[in-house]
Image (tube, grey):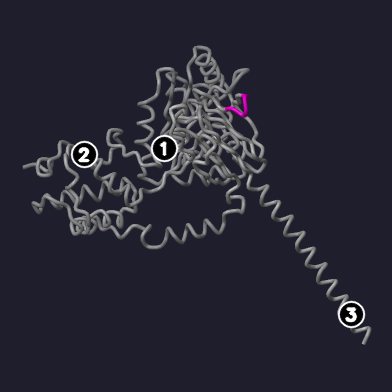
Amino acid sequence: MSYLEHFSLTEQPFRLTPDPDFLYWSKQHARAKAYMESTIWLADGFVVITGEIGSGKTTLLQSFLADLESDVVYAVVSQTQLTPTQFLQSVLTEFGFKPFNKRKIELLDMLNMFLIEQYTNGKKVLLIIDEAQNLSKKVLEEVRMISGIETHKEKVLRIILAGQPELKETLESDRLKQLMQRVRLRFHIGPLDRRELREYIERRLSVAGRSRPDLFADDSFEVVYRFSGGIPRLINTLCDTALLCAFADEKKVIEANDILNAAEELNWPEHESNTGVYSQLRQLELEREPASSSHVSRIEIRRDDEVVESLTFPLGRVIIGRSPDNEIYIRSKFVSRHHAQLVSDDTGCVIEDLNSTNGVFIGERQVKKYRLRDGDVLSIGVHELVYHDLRLAQDSDDTIDEGDMGNEDAGQGSEDDAQESAVNEK
């Protein structure tokens, strides 16, 4: 009897090769895909997706590409240890050119003409750069330059950078400030939590032909989490090894002890997320985070003059829509899947329509992009969103505190004067 027959499977459930059919849609993966999709809605779409090794970035990209409409022309560059000229050649090669033995200025001209031609033909052009953490700063500067190619109306190249966490550190260097100003959305794919890990394993087994979720015993999932830290690639390796060990022992169910045996076979220690290392790093990150990371806006969601929900948000972008992966989730047929976004920075907050079906209104006026003022009421379908700037409330509290302090000082002064007068009378 074969390995697959023994466990009632039709194919290997834990292969390491990316396969969109096996993709498990955790909330994080759904959010990352939504951000990638935003590059298509927005003419100047520029998105950065980061994640640990084995977090599922490549599989996610493949799923995203499989769903693109026919009006999208795309190129994927995954060999990223290149000079600026080699990078431009790679991009043009992916778009169907033979750009060799050309000077850099000729390459830029070829790309510019191609983008304008595609725009004229009603096409959207998307460039995806995988393993972008390996790009040199010179090449990243080249990325910034080509992202600025535009017609008299709008930019014509949409860009997705995907890479390991080091990409985030590189992009935040002073030298790349101008590039970061072009980035519309950033998202980091973290590890799966314990509930997601179980759903991930059972999802893969189901796709591989297992009809019932009973192959892994309840006590096995916690051990998988201990040694994988919730990283999909590590989960696959550990579970596949456990299946092989159990098959050799003619066992039909994978128990905690089988996972421990597999970890021993692989010579794996417990994952660092369970040794305190991650929590220590997170504590250091929190200590280093500036005060501006605190929540700066409150959105009150109303329907029929009743408050449905009240949410607060820090600086950054907040997506509004009827898809559960949005930060503001409104379950309504009048709301598009990704309807609009709020962008908060040091100067305030802007609402921007994401090409929704029913639009965004301030009073009777439909707006595409609008800088909000405290108390503004947004109409989205049958719901109203009331914007509150929490920084105004903080400024008001600070003013009151200063006034109270002044009164206390004045009161103290009067008391001291009275004491001094009493002493003089004596």
Question: Mark 1 or mark 2, which is nearer to you?
Answer: 1
Q: Which label is found at residue 352?
A: none
Question: Mark 3 or mark 1, which is nearer to you?
Answer: 3
Residue 249, x across and y down, in percent: 10, 54
| Residue 241 to residue 29: above or below | below
* Residue linked to disc 3: 420
Residue placed at 81% from the left, 72% from the top?
412
Query: Which element is circle 2 on?
Result: helix
Lower position in the chain sequence, tag 3 or tag 1: 1
* Residue linked to disc 1: 324
Residue 317 figure quarter: top right
- The residue positioned farthest toward the top in the image shown: 121
Residue 387, x across and y down, in percent: 60, 39
Give the residue type that dot 1 points to. Pro
* Residue linked to disc 2: 206
- The residue positioned farthest toward the left in the image shown: 1
